[in-house]
Amino acid sequence: MSDLTELVLASHNAGKLKELQAMLGDRVRVRSVGEFSQVEPEETGLSFVENAILKARNAARLSGLPALADDSGLAVDALGGAPGIYSARYADGKGDAANNAKLLDVLRDVPDAERTGQFVCVLALVRHADDPLPILCEGLWPGRILHAAQGEHGFGYDPLFQPDGEAVSAAELAPAEKNQRSHRARAMAQLKQRLGL
Ligand SMILES: O=c1nc[nH]c2c1ncn2[C@H]1C[C@H](O)[C@@H](COP(=O)(O)OP(=O)(O)OP(=O)(O)O)O1
Ligand SMILES: [Mg+2]
């Protein structure tokens, strides 16, 4: 697939799109599925992999281009891996601030030692809508859930997540630093290797 010159990013999340674009650099012409439709596909899968494939196929169908989707989320150990694939919908679609408020509330009485978890990212690339062999890559970013929001960068749960080995939250890392270390960066490194990019 080193002949990949143009692809569509199958995401409606501005924060994610920015990170994926920065990681892909300018060797590939990147479009966004929002250019083709504002309708978000229903994420009916039971796994990150299934939802990533579903979003990639949808974008490939809409655009006629190869499509790259990212399905990601935060898996908290004390919650048995929740919110996981439901991370974006944790507070019933009320958005990042409501999701973060709910997570803090649910973990209110959980002590530091038990506030571990990880960000998960699965990237799925399909060459066309019916591609029988999607390229799948995953990345994990372990850390712990803070007691209050810290930092202004990033998106989603970043202000509540302190990655292992960092003294600050993911939202306090410079964007370029997050893009070298995150779950998404780890999955993207694999993908670039697979594609010869
Ligand atoms: O680096 C991250 N930093 C902070 N939060 C993150 C990150 N990566 C995923 N997350 C959270 C955001 C959202 O609550 C969920 C992803 O849900 P997910 O369905 O994959 O994405 P989405 O609905 O926001 O956009 P779309 O499906 O159009 O790509 O996990
Ligand atoms: Mg989504």
Image (cartoon, rainbow, N blue to C red):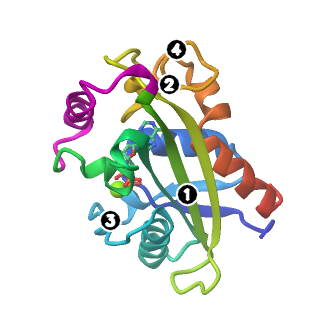
Answer whether labels 3 and 2 touch (C-beta < 8 Å): no
The magenta-colored residue range is 93-113
From what the image shows, is residue 52 above or below residue 155? below
Q: Which residue is mark 4?
A: 168
The response on whether ligand 1 sits within 8 Å of label 2 is yes
Q: Disc 1 on helix, strand or loop? A: strand
Quarter in which the C terminus is drawn: bottom right
Assess whether residue 107 is covered by the magenta stretch: yes
Residue type for callout 2: Ala
Residue shown at 42%/61% (left/top)? 33
Residue occupied by mark 1: 122
What percent of the width, then of the height, locates residue 103?
27, 34
Q: Are marks 2 and 1 in contact (CB under 8 Å)?
A: no
Give the spatial CA distance, label 1 vs label 3: 22 Å
Mark 4 or 3: in front is: 4
Alpha-carbon distance for marks 4 and 3?
Answer: 37 Å
| Quadrant housing residue 127 | bottom right
Which amino acid type corresponds to the residue marked 4 in the rendered image?
Val
Q: Is mark 3 within 8 Å of ligand 1?
A: no
Q: Earlier in the sequence, mark 1 or mark 4?
A: 1
Where disc 2 sits, the SS reads loop
Please rate how many residues cluster around mark 3, counting C-alpha atoms within 10 Å: few if below 14, some from 14 to 19, many from 20.
Answer: few
Q: Can residue 154 be seen at all in this image of the molecule?
A: no
Q: Residue at (69%, 54%) from the top-left corner? A: 28
Point out the tag, 4 or 3, that comes first from the N-terminus. Answer: 3
- The residue identified by callout 3 is 37
- Of circles 3 and 2, the one toward us is 2
Residue indicated by mark 2: 170
The kind of residue tagged 1 is Val
Query: In which of the image's four quarters is ligand 2 placed?
Result: bottom left
